[in-house]
Amino acid sequence: MSQYQTDIDAIATLKSTQNGTWDGINPEYAARMKAQNRFKTGLDIARYTAAIMRQDMADYDADSSQYTQSLGCWHGFVGQQKMLSIKKHQGTVKKSYLYLSGWMVAALRSEFGPLPDQSMHEKTTVPMLIEELYTFLRQADANELGKLFKQLDEAKTNGGDVAAIQDQIDNFESHVVPIVADIDAGFGNEEATYLLAKKMIEAGACCIQIENQVSDAKQCGHQDGKVTVPHEDFLAKINAVRYAFLELGVDDGVIVARTDSLGAGLTQKIPVSNAPGDLASQYNAFLETTEVNGPDDINDGDLVIKQDGKLVKPERLPNGLFRFKANTGVDRVVLDCITSLQNGADLLWIETEKPHVRQIADMVDEIRKVVPDAKLVYNNSPSFNWTLNFRQQVFDAWQEEGKDVSAYDRDKLMSAQYDESELAGIADKKIQSFQKDAAREAGIFHHLITLPTYHTAALSTDNLAKGYFGDEGMLAYVKGVQRKEIREGLACVKHQAMAGSDLGDTHKEYFSGEGALKASGKDNTMNQFDA
């Protein structure tokens, strides 16, 4: 027996015990509403999606072609439309997640107005957006199931295939998927990290991504001036997130440890080493230092540490920060990643300056010498100029092979004059296969784009505004938006239904019967889209 039928029977039994006071309640209608609201709390969602993500991780370990993907969404509606689109075109939402970008929260959701990605926005905005995203995804479930229930009623009335529609209802695939949620550097100390993590998990987050930058000096991963924290500080925050998961009963919650060390040349703090070769000692070994031979080598306020049997003075900038040795970024990344995985993290995020499979793979190969099943979440960032990067990669490969590249100017490969060239064609194929190649060769389990919908909103608005306020007038909207929605089968063309009008009518009918005042009658202009 299906869960749907089980619920009908259970509610009918309960109704029968109410001495006629529930005569206005239809058990099947109540079962339908229950099916349309499968997840009662954010914790229900977190537990459900954590199990999905853990299974996906196991699938990837067995077969690297089973990688997962997501797009960053800054509003619940955007996330809803993304998942509806994926289900429509792919037939399933499996292996598809949402990404919650701290960058987009800062730029688009702060009450201060647009802000840079520096953890200046209200931290409560992050769990609020998680809750918003899941509210819209649950509404997508309710709308789609509502359509199936109407089909079921029609089939029962007109002798249709009731069993086939019932099967679709019983095996309905939810639009609720895992969210990889950005907690930045924790918005404070480890206690602040724990408190915010709890709010995020209660809102539905099964996966929290945290980075090893200094919280109050946090920078976007693709900007200069990044400052990292010692391993002990970062591990304390990983522990804080794990405690939050355990406290709330999401025992298989996922932690993504992000390292910004590849592009970070500074540290705010020199940790205390308690034994030779401990984590603090390894961290301090990367510091840029000068040897101290006597008191004259020390100025007032200078800091001196003992290192390898010698007294050395770490290089300190006027702002009090300490500099790392040049060309140590890769080694620091590898140590960061191994340490994080050995101390409770589940996945890694290595922030790079360019999308290069071999660069990522070289670091992952080193990490896997210690942790063989190390896996990455990777930022397919809009901060990269993908066209230029991959054209230059092809140019460099050709040059190394001895191929004639005299027809190309490496520094100007972004130019439109090369768009139809052989080099550009090969570069585009490499971009197309980047995710598949990186999943196979560089241990990338999850590919995401942090802020794609920021750019798509800007681009689509520009295209519409250009035509509407120009010579095209209303044709710009009709041809460029509405006609495309109709031709491409976007449910959103019926915007009243998408916003919940049909669902509300159904509920009114449940509650009021024939006396319901419904919005979907013959004078509803949405009927024009049925033609």
Image (tube, rainbow, N blue to C red):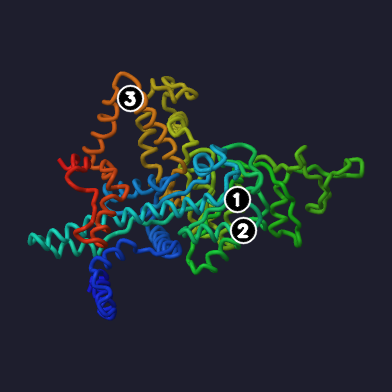
Density class for disc 1 (Cα within 10 Å; few <14, some 14-19, many ≥20) is many
Identify the residue shown where x is 38% and y is 46%: 77
In screen coordinates, is 141 left or right of 325? left
- Quadrant of the rendered structure where residue 274 is? bottom right
Callouts 1 and 2 close, C-beta under 8 Å? yes
Earlier in the chain: of badge 1 and badge 3, it is: 1
The N terminus, quarter of image? bottom left
* 117 lies above or below 64: above
Amino acid marked by disc 3? Tyr
Expressed as whole percent of the image width and height from the top left, the position of residue 179 reads 44, 54
Query: Circle 3 sits in a helix, a strand or a loop, which is it?
Result: helix
Q: Earlier along the polypeptide chain: callout 1 or callout 2? A: 1
Under tag 2, what secondary structure? helix
Q: CA distance from mark 1 to mark 2?
A: 9 Å
- The image quarter in which residue 3 lies: bottom left
Q: Position of residue 271 (x, y in %)?
A: 74, 54
**Picture coordinates of residue 257, whole percent (x, y):** 55, 54
The residue located at (27%, 68%) in the rendering is: 31
Q: Are marks 3 and 2 in contact (CB under 8 Å)?
A: no
Between 112 and 378, the one lying in front of the other is: 112
Give the residue drawn at x 75%, y 62%: 275
Whether residue 79 is situated above or below residue 420 in the rendered picture: below
Mark 2 Cα within 10 Å, few/some/many (few <14, many 20+)? many
Q: Residue furthest left?
A: 159
State the residue position of label 1. Answer: 185
SS category of the residue bearing label 1: loop
Which amino acid type corresponds to the residue marked 1 in the rendered image?
Answer: Ala
Q: Is residue 453 left or right of residue 320?
A: left
Residue annotated with mark 3: 468
